[in-house]
Amino acid sequence: MRAITIALLAGLTTLVGVAAPAAQASAAGRAPSCLAYTLDDRGAQDELWVWNNCKKGVNFRVRLAYGPDSYCTYKEPRSTYSKFTWEWPQRFDGLVTC
């Protein structure tokens, strides 16, 4: 019985360790829809232009699959665009607040 309890606790610790990063990643919310972007993902290098149509400034991060997310960027309302680029196989996964 003791061996089964230890094995169950070890399995639970493993599950908690796996679930914790996912909980941290979901802490950032989806960026507001007034934060507009245009994506060109037709080539080996993808390009993303982001501009702020919101009434307030927005802190956001570019989420990428298969690669690191961008740093946290602040955009003033109605300011010029910010450009982001990355190489394949990374893929655009959306904009999140930070």
Image (cartoon, rainbow, N blue to C red):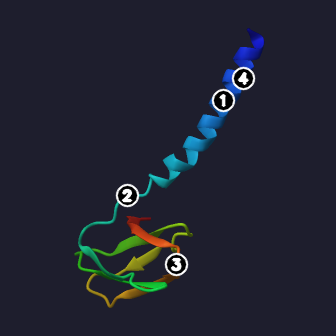
Q: Earlier in the sequence, mark 4 or mark 2?
A: 4
Q: Residue at x 50, y 46 (%)?
A: 23
Q: CA distance from mark 1 to mark 2?
A: 30 Å
The circle on residue 7 is 4
Identify which amino acid the numbered label 3 is placed on: Trp
**Residue marked by disc 1:** 11
- Cβ atoms at labels 1 and 3 below 8 Å apart: no
Furthest residue to the top?
1
Q: Is residue 94 above or below residue 28?
A: below
Residue 5 position, x and y percent, is: 70, 16
Q: Earlier in the sequence, mark 3 or mark 4?
A: 4
Which element carries disc 3, helix, strand or loop?
A: loop
Identify which amino acid the numbered label 2 is placed on: Gly
Q: Earlier in the sequence, mark 2 or mark 3?
A: 2
Q: Residue at x 48, y 69 (%)?
A: 64
- Cβ atoms at labels 4 and 2 below 8 Å apart: no
- Cβ atoms at labels 4 and 1 below 8 Å apart: yes
**Residue marked by disc 2:** 29
